[in-house]
Image (cartoon, grey):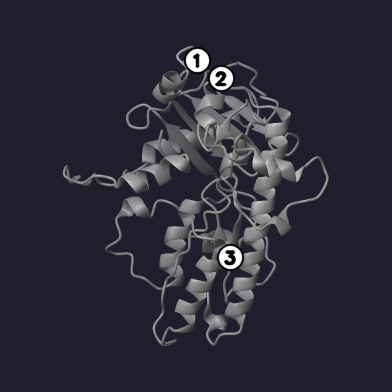
Amino acid sequence: MIAPRLLLDNMFAWIKAWDRKTPFFLFANVLSPHFPWTLPIGFLPRGDGFNLKYLLNYDLLTLKKQWEFNSGKRQVTDTHRRVWHTLYDASIRHVDSEIGRFVEQLRQLAGWEETILIVTSDHGEMMGDYRGIVGHVLSLHDNLIHVPLIIRHPDYLSGLTVEGVVQTLDLYPSLLEWAGVPTGRVPSSQLQRPPLSKSISAANDPSGYAFAEEDYTDSYDIIGKLLQVNPAADPNQYPRQQIAVHSASHKYIWYNDRPGELFDLGSDPLEEHNLMDGSISTDLPFVQELQGALETWRANLELFPPQQVDGNGAIDPVMLEHLRALGYMP
């Protein structure tokens, strides 16, 4: 895992050496907010229930044993939660500091006025606070799917807040539009979400929907992995399929094997009180709206055309271990 400063310094050196005449696209994936959360000690708090001796306890420094926690083989303690939250928050502060330093460097270069800069994340982290889930699997809770999205664009006002609901898939058509890329040869399946310019042009309009999905029915057998770790685990504890539809005010989650859930995000941002309470009734306010949005989305969803996979290809063992360490492979 490359340290944020080294990664961003290398990125800045590349930009600085560019000829300044040809537009370019550059992407950096800063992984340090993932466990095991290695960061400069100066970002760690003193006091507030955090003891530096915790840094000597490997069990408290990593979520790598998430399968044991999620299968019920081990229990998440208050100490686990406190230490995990402290290290996670400190790691985010560290990355925020390094990104700020990187942006200040960029501001000194010619061409900054025409630069588009996007800061976002692929997911959050579950640390045992919600239904005891650890890692970034098994849930569509907002702790996991509600991520930052900050855009610096020369054509938009600084400090503008967009009230509409968007999602990270919207970035792809947005970048094509902002770069002036013709979309005639882009598969329609990749342009099903609107570009962010639509939401930005109506910044005070809290409309729109965002969708998130987890499906363990045909490829990623997490339930099987949990049973492998703990044969006594309940195979029905977690759904194999779930889809969330998120409006500005409410969130509805559909499950394939149990009643859905509805949350009022204004009065219940932590999603602790299911308004459906086990009921399958559609008479509750917002249920019909969100269910209808979900059905429309699924009916109109155009899948990417399948690609033939080279049967001779194999994942490098080192890369496979990295994927497992990050929680992407069981």
Mark 2–mark 1 Cα distance, whole angstroms, equals 6 Å
Mark 3 or 2: in front is 2
Q: Residue furthest right?
A: 47
Q: Which mark is residue 233?
A: 1
Q: Which mark is residue 151?
A: 3
Label 3 crowd bin: few (<14), some (14–19), many (20+), radius 10 Å = some
Q: Nearer the viewer, residue 301 or 49?
A: 49
Mark 1–mark 3 Cα distance, whole angstroms, equals 43 Å
- Residue at x 50%, y 66% (from the top left corner): 7
> How many numbered markers are drawn?
3
Q: Do callouts 2 and 1 mark residues in contact (Cβ within 8 Å)? A: yes
Going by the numbered disc 1, the residue's amino acid type is Ala
Is 299 on the left-hand or right-hand side of 107? left
Is 286 on the left-hand or right-hand side of 254? right
Q: Is residue 272 visible?
A: yes
Callout 1: SS: loop
Q: Nearer the viewer, residue 229 or 222?
A: 229
Identify the residue under disc 2: 72
Mark 3–mark 2 Cα distance, whole angstroms, equals 41 Å
Going by the numbered disc 2, the residue's amino acid type is Gly
Q: Nearer the viewer, residue 57 or 104?
A: 57
Callout 3: SS: strand
Q: Position of residue 136 (x, y in %)?
A: 53, 38
Callout 2: SS: loop
- Residue at x 32%, y 29% (from the top left corner): 218
Q: Position of residue 11 (x, y in %)?
A: 48, 72
Going by the numbered disc 3, the residue's amino acid type is Ile
Q: Position of residue 49 (x, y in %)?
A: 81, 40
Q: Is residue 289 visible?
A: no
Mark 1 or 3: in front is 1
